[in-house]
Image: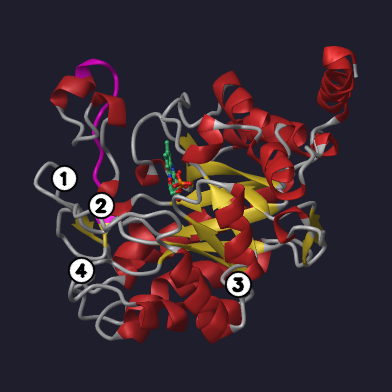
């Protein structure tokens, strides 16, 4: 039997991932003043114990205004960086590469945690010590009725946010992360600039595709300049807006190509999020976008979205649609997804995917099972 692609290593710059399974960033809304807690260590650590090659820390605000909610992780000060270093250390000591997603929530900032409704923070929240803040966007257009109207950014605001991305990338490097992913998806600030639905500017940061790409590409260029040459840079995009008049896959191919020329290594192909309308869902529904970007740009891509089992993950790789597979919710349901995938694809679980203390115990289970029934 040929060795499954999902279990084969993948090298990007100086980093070799031990397999192709990546844990997609997942906001936990559980940070305190932007500082990760033991919750994050356990949440992320279990995926390293389960054999994933790369674990990416959730959308991390590059400035306080860039948080979705008051519980978001941040990386605009050294206390936040110190706490994140503990997580990077643990992931790496457990055999996974450590990634972090740098983000700015734009007009989707200043909201309640999802389990509190996810709607605009108000005076009621202020009474609990969680004050609303002014949100930023390319144009003063709210995301939806229950969202705040953002401030249309000035050119000085744009320059300030670019520097915040730069400083956060420097801190991520110092904290020991192997991979930075720039978040340009899901209706957050960079996506808002890219999409004609949310960018109605008439200056150099709006208008045609080149104008709408300008600010996200300036972020890419600035981050790449401080992110070490040996470390890979990922870019998460919403490949399409799923509505007429929104971003198309041609826009995304053009953006990926420009970003690649500036030193992005992997395009992580998600979709949607810039309107409240959900797309039609089916297993692997976003893989065709990863395929298109990979084919048209020659860049490495990552497929994500309802990749529910090892067979689907393997077929996406084998059919040349993507180089990496990212999972989020399936990993919450099964943190040992990689180990179970090895069993599904080869007929025997590869416990060596887990770090030694876990592997040793699992080997003992396998040994005992061989003796069950007197064999
Ligand atoms: C709890 C939760 C939090 C998420 N937080 C983020 C995030 O911080 N950044 C991001 O780009 N996507 C985020 N997502 C989207 C996932 O990374 C992923 O793209 C999406 O869930 C589809 O993959 P899945 O079907 O494997 O879950 C989140 C998803 C979930 C379920």
The response on whether ligand 1 sits within 8 Å of label 3 is no
Does residue 368 appear left or right of residue 56 in this picture? right
* Residue at the spot 27% in from the left edge and 78% down from the top edge: 206
The residue to which callout 2 is attached is: 107
Vertical position of residue 58 compared to residue 32: above or below: below
Give the percent coordinates (x, y) of residue 370: 87, 22
**Of residues 257 and 151, the one drawn nearer to the viewer in this rendering:** 257
* Residue at the spot 60% in from the left edge and 63% down from the top edge: 315
Give the percent coordinates (x, y) of residue 189: 34, 58
The residue to which callout 4 is attached is: 243
Report the number of discs.
4
Q: Label 1 near label 2: C-beta < 8 Å?
A: yes
Q: Quadrant of ligand 1?
A: top left
> How much space separates mark 4 and mark 3, taking CA atoms?
28 Å
- Nearer the N terminus, badge 2 or badge 1? 2
The response on whether ligand 1 sits within 8 Å of label 2 is no
């Amino acid at each position: 039997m040929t060795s499954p692609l999902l279990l084969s290593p993948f090298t990007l710059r100086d980093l070799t991932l031990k397999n192709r399974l990546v844990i997609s960033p997942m906001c936990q809304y559980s940070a305190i003043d932007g500082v990760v807690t033991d919750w994050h260590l356990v949440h992320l650590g279990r995926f390293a114990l389960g054999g994933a090659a790369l674990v990416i820390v959730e959308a991390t605000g590059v400035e306080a205004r860039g948080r979705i909610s008051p519980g978001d992780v941040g990386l605009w000060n050294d206390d936040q960086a110190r706490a994140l270093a503990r997580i990077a250390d643990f992931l790496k000591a457990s055999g996974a590469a450590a990634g972090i997603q740098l983000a700015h929530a734009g007009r989707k900032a200043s909201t309640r945690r999802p389990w509190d409704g996810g709607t605009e923070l108000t005076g009621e929240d202020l009474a609990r010590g969680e004050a609303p803040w002014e949100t930023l966007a390319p144009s003063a257009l709210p995301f939806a009725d229950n969202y705040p109207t953002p401030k249309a950014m000035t050119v000085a605001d744009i320059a300030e946010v670019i520097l915040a991305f730069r400083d956060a990338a420097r801190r991520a490097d110092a904290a020991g992360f192997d991979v930075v992913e720039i978040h340009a998806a899901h209706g957050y600030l960079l996506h808002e600039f890219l999409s004609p639905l949310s960018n109605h500017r008439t200056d150099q940061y709006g208008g045609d595709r080149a104008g709408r790409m300008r600010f996200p590409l300036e972020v890419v260029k600035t981050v790449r300049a401080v992110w070490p040459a040996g470390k890979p840079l990922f870019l998460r995009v919403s490949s399409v807006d799923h509505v007429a008049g929104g971003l198309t896959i041609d826009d995304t191919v053009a953006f990926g190509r420009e970003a690649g020329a500036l030193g992005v290594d992997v395009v992580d192909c998600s979709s949607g999020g810039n309107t409240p309308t959900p797309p039609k869902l089916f297993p692997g529904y976003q893989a065709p976008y990863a395929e298109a970007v990979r084919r048209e740009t020659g860049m490495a891509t990552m497929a994500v979205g309802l990749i529910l089992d090892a067979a689907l993950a393997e077929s996406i790789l084998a059919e040349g649609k993507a180089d990496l597979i990212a999972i989020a919710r399936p990993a919450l349901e099964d943190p040992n997804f990689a180990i179970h995938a090895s069993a599904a694809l080869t007929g025997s679980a590869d416990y060596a995917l887990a770090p030694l203390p876990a592997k040793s115990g699992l080997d003992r289970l396998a040994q005992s099972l061989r003796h069950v029934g007197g064999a």
